[in-house]
Amino acid sequence: MQPPDHRRAASKPPLGWRAAAVTPAAHAALAAPFALAAFFALAAVAPPALAATSISDGDLGFAIPVGVAEAGKAPPAISFSASLPLRGVSLDVKRSDGRAFRLAVGNLAPGRERRVAVRQEKGSFEYRATVRGQGPDGPIEPFDLTFSLTVGAVPRIAIRADDVDLENGRLIVRVTEPKGHIALEVWDKHGAPLDEVDVAYDAPPGSPLTVAWKQRPGQVAGRFALKAYDIAEFWSGIESVTFVDIPHEDVVFESGKWDILPTEEAKLLAPLKQIAVEIGKVAGVLPISLYVAGYTDTVGQPADNVELSRKRAAAIAAWFRKKGLKVPILHQGFGEAVLAVPTPDGTDEARNRRAVYVLTSTTPPASAGFPGGGWRRL
């Protein structure tokens, strides 16, 4: 998104003055604070370099800072030059909030440039300045010029694990800048678009800002991309996969048992490696947890199958912990409540004896795949 055009037309000085356009120093581009690929990415950009406006028909030339600048960096400056010797050049400046001050330029020698900084705190203001000074034959006729200037900063974003409410389609964002807007795109866990919103904010830095999106009942946000902009259109962004289903080959357990056989451990090595890769992408950015859900076929009593599936999920969770996985691991068993292949009661179906491994930054909401809560932490 390009920043708005902040340029304003400057009033012409009296006829007889010739201006030479002088371009102020370009605003340096911001480096990204850090970037994390795929699962979580953060980047920042700066608006384009400051533009310059010049005055024509005179012997005094100057370039006016027009546009945006970053707080804490070198301030923009008006650049003056003259084709005749001038003395005591100054600007009486009045800002749109009523603040008045004088900028002293001093003496200008022909062919020499002098730069005068315009210092401003973060915000957006209009300026009107009256130029005065002495020429070779006496005082120059005062004339006015106008310009605008916006000073901003790259917002830093904070989102905690409990700030993400996937079930109700909203999240809470905290940013370090007091005014701007937040753009959010959301996709479901299959990659289909859910919603795209843009919300303006005007609140003290660090205030909780709620951003909501639309989703139908039963839908779950699998990924979102968020950008927070300040008033100068400086921005930082977060792209997060909030719900990652880890592919794997299911462990085969002996009938009625939950011990992982040594011959089955190889089936857990590939998902363990993939889990570590995904966790590494968000390290230090957002808390992440692993959820292990167990399921059974329809042989046996439903209550017994719930307990059996819970113990099998717990055994897999414990194996991951034993192999060095340090993130929080939670497990739950859903028995025969969620059949991968619908069968009559009492049917021995291997495809229904399975487990699901999910990485997420928030507790999985109740859904067709997870028909209840009650997750147990390992």
Image (cartoon, rainbow, N blue to C red):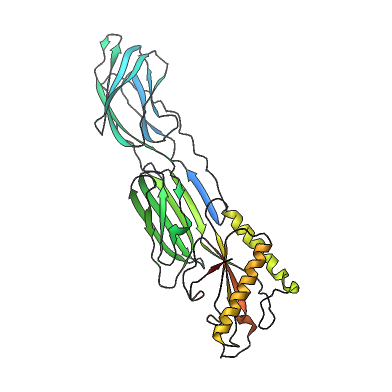
Q: Residue at x 35, y 31 (%)?
A: 120
Task: In the rendered view, tell whether residue 244 sits above or below residue 232.
Answer: below
Q: Where residue 203 sits in the image (x, y, percent)?
A: 33, 47
Q: Residue at x 44, y 42 (%)?
A: 154
Q: Residue furthest right?
A: 263
Where on the picture, by quarter, is residue 308?
Answer: bottom right
Left or right position of 303 against 270: left
Task: In the rendered view, tell whether residue 25 sits above or below residue 40.
Answer: above
From the viewer's side, name the closer residue of 35 and 45: 35
Q: Where residue 131 sits in the image (x, y, percent)?
A: 28, 21
Q: Residue at x 54, y 69 (%)?
A: 376
Q: Where residue 313 sits in the image (x, y, percent)?
A: 61, 73
Where on the picture, by quarter, is residue 195?
Answer: bottom left
Left or right position of 23 against 303: left
Residue 340 visible to the viewer: no
Residue 22 visible to the viewer: yes
Total count of labels: 0
Where on the picture, by quarter, is residue 125?
Answer: top left
